[in-house]
Amino acid sequence: MNSVRLEGVGGDRHQFTVTNLGAVACPLANSFAAWARYGVDRAAQQILGSPLQRIETMGSYSCRNVAGTARRSAHSRGEAIDVAAFVLEDGRRVSVRSGWNASAREREFLRVIHRSACKRFGTVLGPDYNRAHEDHFHLEYGSGSFCR
Ligand SMILES: [Zn+2]
């Protein structure tokens, strides 16, 4: 599968940056770009009142050591992205770890974008799935629909 490096993603009015992300498979990059723009950026504007400036990822390998699975991680094929935090234009930073149980608006923002990710990715895992995901969303390319 072809892969691509994603460093900037187009939003409604400007580009936002994506940090710490290695090469990912093209279909995943396309889904991620659409989610960032139509899911995250618009939810940030509507719920938090500021556009998105940056998405912080955890690179490609943070799920490699999830216990109890023999399955080869999608990260090793560039087909999954772990997202840790969102930085808004007004300077606020909403991380999955601190925001999941924070103020009502941050909680709503994170749950809305988690749900919208489920429409675009085959597998989405977050803090409600297990402790290994308490600090990030795992977004994996595929045709399934596993959303936790
Ligand atoms: Zn992951």
Image (cartoon, rainbow, N blue to C red):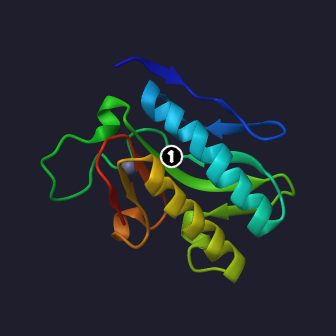
Residue sticking out furthest to the left: 70
Residue sticking out furthest to the right: 90
Callout 1 crowding tier (Cα within 10 Å): few <14, some 14–19, many ≥20: many
The x and y percentages for residue 85 are 61, 56
Q: Which of 148 and 138 lies nearest the eye of the viewer?
A: 148
Q: Is residue 43 shown above or below 35?
A: below
Q: Which residue is mark 1?
A: 58
The x and y percentages for residue 90 are 87, 57
Residue at (50%, 46%) from the top-left corner?
58
Q: Is residue 79 shown above or below 50?
A: above
* Left or right of 89 in this view: 29: left
Kindly indicate the quadrant of the structure image that contains residue 37. Answer: top right
Does residue 25 appear in the picture of this structure? no
SS category of the residue bearing label 1: loop
For the residue marked with disc 1, what is the amino acid? Met
Q: Is mark 1 within 8 Å of ligand 1?
A: yes
Q: Which of 52 and 27 lies nearest the eye of the viewer?
A: 27
* Left or right of 138 in this view: 145: left
Residue at (64%, 29%) from the top-left corner?
7
Kindly indicate the quadrant of the structure image that contains residue 113. Answer: bottom right
Residue at (34%, 38%) from the top-left corner?
75
Q: Is residue 146 shown above or below 63?
A: below
The x and y percentages for residue 43 are 70, 60
The x and y percentages for residue 53 are 77, 46
* Left or right of 91 in this view: 43: left
Residue at (62%, 72%) from the top-left corner?
99
Q: Is residue 139 shown above or below 6?
A: below
